[in-house]
Amino acid sequence: MRPIRLRLPATSANLGPGFDTAGLAMALYLTIDAVAPQTPGAPVFAIEATGRNADRCARTGNNMILDTYRDLLDRAGRPLAPLDLRIDNQIPLGMGCGSSAAARLAGVLLANHFGGLGWDRQACMDEAARREGHPDNVAACVLGAMTVSAISDGSVVAATCAQGLSWKLLLAFPSASLSTEKARALLPYHYSRADAVMNVQRTALLVAAFALGRGDLLRVAMQDRIHQPYRMDACPLLGRLLPLAGGPGILGVALSGAGPGVLLVLETAAAVPEIAARIRRAAEDPELEIIETAIGGGASQSFPEALSSGASE
């Protein structure tokens, strides 16, 4: 089986009001070079990892990419093909940047390739979304840019826009991570009609803002009453940064996915160093980690013949 290279973007889900439906691909990527080892007696899995959280990415046990790969091949009744992986990771783990969606999608794509499943992009997206439990991050990871999605009859229905937008993005991270499961456990089961209507209105504005490049709408369009108020105690950075929305250079602010990271959308010509300093003052943390990025493209796969089985050498 020929080698494969995968490139999958980080994603920020919800964007404020678009709970479990809106997602934004960002130009921070998980890149995986995968080959079937030719060395007799080589381990089933070997990983060479670089980049962010390289130690965690290099584990062959409790690895979401490999767990997805193994489980999908088993369910499909296909033999487990050994893999050598070279991973370069730019996606923060446990910070609300879609690391699990990228990992699960990677596992599905690897199983599809090395297991000869013959699935198309839609089938791969459906399987990854099923494993995630919601489509927002997966759809944005697959399609890129700003994506809205829904599940209908077990399949993801999605559309994407904002491919040409040049708005700058900043991500601000506290020191401690937060699992999606814990963040979801904070949410109520019922909402008032007023809160539901407020979010429907903002979500409609959100889509229009990205589709039309209307940054002036984002201060209002990224407001939320469905999940952010209930996650504020677990994600205190959000409460400190929300008042910055609509200030000089800052179009909108929202929790990135389930948090605890915070996404800030900036004007194209915004002065990032000045805004970063403003963010750190608001957070009362001069060492606060801030990453600058941009709207990213969707997942890609290629087949470089030059890849060698080097992870286990």
Image: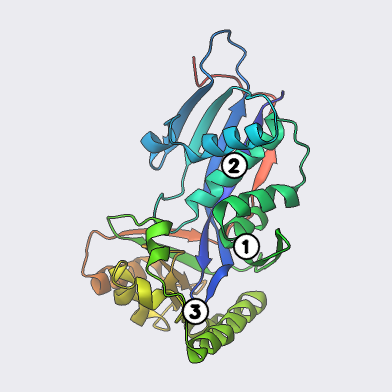
Q: Residue 22 location in percent, x, y? A: 58, 69
Q: Which residue is mark 2?
A: 106
185 sits to left or right of 196: left
In the rendered view, does 106 fall on the left or right side of 120? left
Which residue is depicted at the point 58% across and 50% down? 131
Q: Is residue 293 left or right of residue 185?
A: right
Q: Secondary structure at mark 3?
A: loop
Which residue carries the number 3 mark? 222
* Residue type, mark 2 in image: Ala
N-term mark: 3 or 1: 1
Using the rendered view, name the quadrant where residue 162 is placed. bottom right
Confirm or deny contact between disc 3 and disc 2 (CB under 8 A).
Answer: no
Circles 3 and 1: CB atoms closer than 8 Å: no
The residue depicted at 53 percent of the width and 85 percent of the height is 196
Q: Mark 1 sits on what residue? A: 145
| Residue sitting at the far top | 40
Residue placed farthest to the bottom in the image?
Answer: 194
Disc number lying in front (3 or 2): 2
Amino acid type, label 1? Ala
**Quadrant of the frame with the N terminus:** top right
Q: Secondary structure at mark 2?
A: helix
How many numbered marks, from 0 up?
3
* Distance between mark 2 and mark 1 Cα atoms: 18 Å
